[in-house]
Image (tube, rainbow, N blue to C red):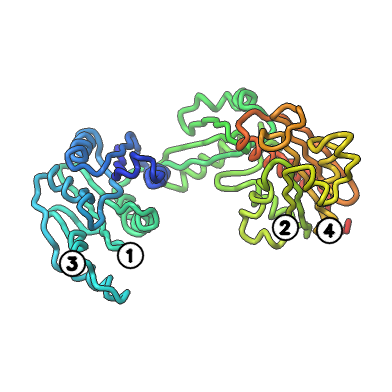
Amino acid sequence: MKAEIISIGTELLLGEITDNNASFLASQLPLLGIDLYFISTVGDNQKRLVETLRRAWERSDIIITTGGLGPTQDDITREAIAELLNEEIKIDVALAQELKAFFGRRGLEMPPSNVKQASVITSAEIIPNPRGTAPGWWVEKGGRTIITMPGPPGEMQLMWEKAVFPKLQQKSEAVILSRTIKTFGLPEAKVDELVSPFLSANDPTLATYAKPDGIHLRVATKAREVKEAKEKLDRREADIRAILKEYIWGVDSETLEAIIGNLLISKKLSLATMEFGTGGFLANLITNVPGSSAYFKGGLVVHSREMALAFGVDDRLLAQYGAMSPEVAEAMATIARQRFKAAIGIAVSGVTGFGETENKAVDTIFISIDDGKNRQNFTRKYPGSPQQLKHRAALAALFELRRILLEGSIDASNY
């Protein structure tokens, strides 16, 4: 089956909001074995929307629309579908009563304009909306299926999960599953070379992608049942792990910061940070993990020599080596560890292009890790914009910490 997504709303064309709905649906359709061929965006204009729907009708088996189901005059998805199918649109009395009850349960009177959301055509089956006032439509006609869902992502995703996905699953004859294997420490060309025997395979397929946290490998396969697809993915992942070994650090939705958190918890270790030039990006990554307060003591963020002095960096180090240096990064790691009474202190000093550069190349990152017994320093160079450099500096620090934690040289018995 071939599918097409149509995102509706002038605000999308103006860049006022990001179309997260299309990306969500694009990730869901492969799970049903449905091939997505096209994604279109169209504004709140009925003529152009009908044209877009007609083009989709001619080339796709399943058409999924999001947006344009509100109560205002520019919400014209229902009217456009009615025009496309040459059907009369009417108010469903029972649905209108349900909408009034929805408002009544909240102590509100339904505005007259909301009755528009009770509009239906003969071939439309109503899809309930547990979170809002805009029900969806499921239309089957002429061997085609049109599915309309509301624009707010929370409403759309719940409707998809509760009603649309299960119904499409009944129509599907296959499933497509994928798995992302995440690596770090090898350039994309080298990864590509090492896994080249699998890149030309038709099933499972394999593709590589460069990401801020390393090179990702996406393995995808198609099968009649989920069990069969998972077994094929497992076998190919085992093949890749046998080649890339320790360079693999995660799979699918796993994040580096969450993996670090689990390692720290398992080893009963705590962590503190100090950053110069990265604006607190490292601390931000660490605290993105739920429950990070169990191991993260806190962080210091400095953006000038004066601030570095105020937090305890020796002025002689600053004068001799400059704030952006391995020596000062090492001092910062110790300050973070001692000030927060943490097992481990990490410091990152980045020449990112923001703030002081001290006539040093804008691409240089200094990292230091202090566990109270040993200090380890690292210098890295990365291309990219200042924002990208800050992100890469934080990730590089976490990768070095992960390596040290896995080596087992730091554990709670040290403290």
Disc 1 marks which residue?
130
Question: Which of the pair 301/78 is nearer the observer?
Answer: 301
Disc 3 marks which residue? 96
Asked if marks 1 and 3 touch (Cβ < 8 Å), the reply is no
- Give how far apart the Cα atoms at labels 1 and 3 are: 15 Å
Q: Which numbered disc, 1 or 3, marks the residue that appears first in the sequence?
A: 3
Q: Report the disc number at residue 296.
A: 2
For label 1, the crowd category at 10 Å Cα-Cα, with few meaning under 14, some 14 to 19 and many 20 or more, is few
Q: Is residue 166 above or below residue 221?
A: below
Q: Could you tell me residue 312's position as x and y percent? A: 85, 50
Foreground: disc 1 or disc 2: 2
Q: Which one is earlier in the sequence, the residue at label 2 or at label 3?
A: 3
The answer to whether one can see residue 28 in this image is no
Residue at horizontal 32 percent and vertical 35 percent from the top: 38
The amino acid type of the residue labelled 3 equals Ala
- Amino acid on which the number 4 mark rests in the picture: Ala
Identify which amino acid the numbered label 2 is placed on: Phe
Mark 1 is on which residue type? Pro
Q: How many marks?
A: 4
- Assess whether mark 1 and mark 4 are in contact (beta carbons under 8 angstroms): no
Question: Where 308 falls versus 377 (above or below)?
Answer: below
The local secondary structure at tag 4 comes to: helix
